[in-house]
């Protein structure tokens, strides 16, 4: 029971960190977690710590897709935030 809860907390923390890094101004901060994920998964695969290859590949693809989607969502939120700020500045007649 505690082991599953710990895994859940780790996964939630990784996705929260991914979202936070994705909302930073520099685009590549959001790429850190997916790259680390691929490196770790590749290391697990090439050190023969995988029992079921198909399941491992599916898990890797799903994890990568979720991380990239979180990256995309963070970038969209950043652009929306910038757009709202520009609209607010225009409404107050403040020029960039």
Image (tube, rainbow, N blue to C red):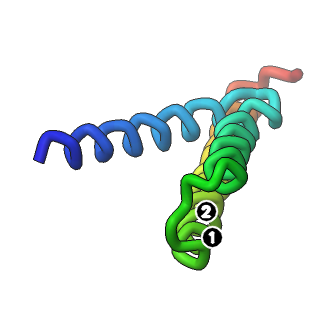
Question: Is any part of residue 79 visible from this angle?
Answer: no
The relative height of residue 31 versus residue 45 in the rendered view (above or below) is above
Q: Which secondary structure lies at badge 1?
A: helix
Q: Position of residue 93 (x, y in %)?
A: 77, 25
Q: Residue shown at 52%/32% (left/top)?
A: 17
Point out the image quarter for the C terminus.
top right
In the displayed structure image, the side of residue 6 where residue 48 appears, left or right: right
Asked which quadrant contains residue 57, the reply is bottom right
Instruction: Mark 2 and mark 1 in contact? Answer it, CB < 8 Å.
Output: yes
Query: Does residue 72 lie above or below 52 as drawn?
Result: above
Mark number, residue 7: none
Q: Residue at x 66, y 56 (%)?
A: 45
Residue at x-position 11% and y-position 48%: 1
Which dot marks residue 57? Answer: 1
Q: On the image, numbered disc 2 is attached to which residue?
A: 60
Residue 49, x across and y down, in percent: 55, 53
Residue nearest the viewer, comparing 72 with 57:
57
Q: Dot 2 lies on which element?
A: helix
Q: Residues within 10 Å of mark 1 (few under 14, many from 20)?
A: some
Judged left or right of residue 28, residue 75 is left
Residue 25 or residue 87, whichever sits in front:
25
Q: Nearer the viewer, residue 52 or 17?
A: 52
Residue 22 image-quadrant placement: top right
Residue 52 position, x and y percent, is 52, 73
The answer for how far apart the CA atoms under marks 2 and 1 are is 5 Å
């Amino acid at each position: 029971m505690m082991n599953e809860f710990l895994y859940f907390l780790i996964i939630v923390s990784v996705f929260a960190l991914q979202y936070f890094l994705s909302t930073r101004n520099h685009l590549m901060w959001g790429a850190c977690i997916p790259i680390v994920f691929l490196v770790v998964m590749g290391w697990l695969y090439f050190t023969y710590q995988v029992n079921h290859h198909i399941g491992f590949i599916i898990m890797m693809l799903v994890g990568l897709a979720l991380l990239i989607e979180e990256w995309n969502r963070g970038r969209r939120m950043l652009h929306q935030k910038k757009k709202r700020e520009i609209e607010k500045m225009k409404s107050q007649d403040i020029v960039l």
